[in-house]
Image (cartoon, rainbow, N blue to C red):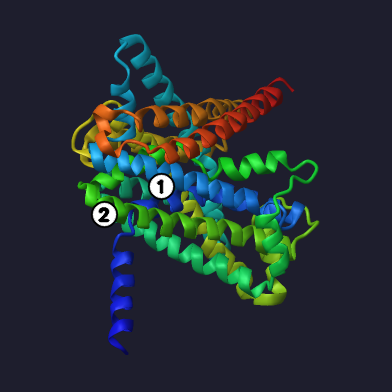
Amino acid sequence: MSQQEATQKKAFKEKLKVIGPGAIISASFIGPGTITTATQAGASYGYALLWAVVFSIITTMVLQVMVARLGIIAQKGLGAAIHDQFANPILKYTVTGFVLASIYIGCAAYMSGDLNGTSLGISTLTGWSINIIGPVVGIIILFLGLSGSYKLIEKVMIILVVIMSIVFITTMIVAKPDIGGILSGVFAPSMPTGSIITIVALIGTTVVPYNLFIHSTTVQEKWNKPSHLKDSRWDIFITIGVGGLITAAILITSGTLMRGVEVETVADLALQLEPILGSWAETFLAIGIFSAGFSSTTASALGAAMVASSMLKWENGMKNWRFKAVFGSVILIGILSFILNFEPLEILLFAQALNGILLPGIAILIMIIMNNKKLLGNYRNSIKMNVVGSIIVIICLALGAHSLITAIGDFLG
């Protein structure tokens, strides 16, 4: 090996060392919902909606870069920054209360579904009953959160992202997709008839509000100097880029093997993989589904707890008993809902409606905070970042309006 190759290898290893907070974000948004949505998108529209995956990843990267900069420079989480942004006590506590309630209800509402997705993966591998697996998985995640160890959770999430990468990217490669069709789906955006709901779902399962709170807090565990901003950006570009590749791989595999097939569950994809992977198809996919469910369930509880911790300014981070109480309550609600099979449509629609208001609202607040000279000094947003951020805010407003209208329509219907 030449000296130049050795230097390049060392530089690559150094870049890998920065991976951490971004991996939690990727592990968070690649859950059962994302897998199902991407599978349905591919089956219904082939490669046509790949551009929506690319757009959602770029949007996620831009917003996460902003909140990571906030955490590193100000050493303050997004929740605390929102709390401190308003001098008027009525406005301060109204915004704080709405954000806390929206994220807590949203995380708790979808917890049962995430546990179900995780259980499905293990059940496929072992043949055990889902009714037993769900609560056991919930208890394991509960103890993971109650450990109060950020480093432990970070390591678990990195491992899960690696597993999902191997599973879903490998399945895409063996499916032998049409490269020309993929390039067309990415660089020639189109909106096939009836695809708007799927587009909103693809973006909505990737650009997750509570991930912005998680990231602004977790970066403080790893970095605390302006010189660390470059490391943080590398972390974001590598891990969230891999997360986007996983989502795209699922859509591409489905678009290659399931075009025109009606998708009811993610397990339908295993049937299409059997001619290629044989008896390993079900096992291989089950490992991916389990990893996605476990990571998403953990991140949901983590998100609710970190939002509360940041906005209410609890000290000692994940070791604070109140942080653990919020984390534990979300998991316990999920376990109870799972056991009772309690997923009332009204609550899910209410959570969807809240998210329709929350995402654009958080995006606007981020833009205000990231231009606060007193808070960030010379590290506030540049003109270029403000232009890009403003475009994202406008799109988030449109997506939020659509999500809100859809939820209200479904509720009244």
Q: Amino acid at mark 1?
A: Thr
Query: Between 142 and 35, which is closer to the camera in this rendering?
Result: 35
Q: Amino acid at mark 2?
A: Lys
Let me know if residue 325 appears in the view. yes
Distance from disc 2 to disc 1, alpha carbons, whole Å, reads 14 Å
What secondary structure is found at the residue carrying circle 2? helix
The residue positioned 42% from the left and 49% from the top of the image is 25
Q: Which of the numbered marks, if any, corresponds to residue 151?
A: 2
The residue positioned 77% from the left and 52% from the top of the image is 262
What secondary structure is found at the residue carrying circle 1? helix
Give the position of the N terminus as an image quadrant.
Answer: bottom left
The residue where tag 1 is placed is 298
Where does the image place residue 51, in percent across and percent down from the top left?
Answer: 64, 51
Where does the image place residue 254, in percent across and percent down from the top left?
Answer: 69, 60
The residue positioned 32% from the left and 11% from the top of the image is 88
Give the position of the C terminus as an image quadrant.
Answer: top right
Query: Between 198 and 335, which is closer to the camera in this rendering?
Result: 198
Where does the image place residue 20, in percent across and percent down from the top left?
Answer: 33, 56
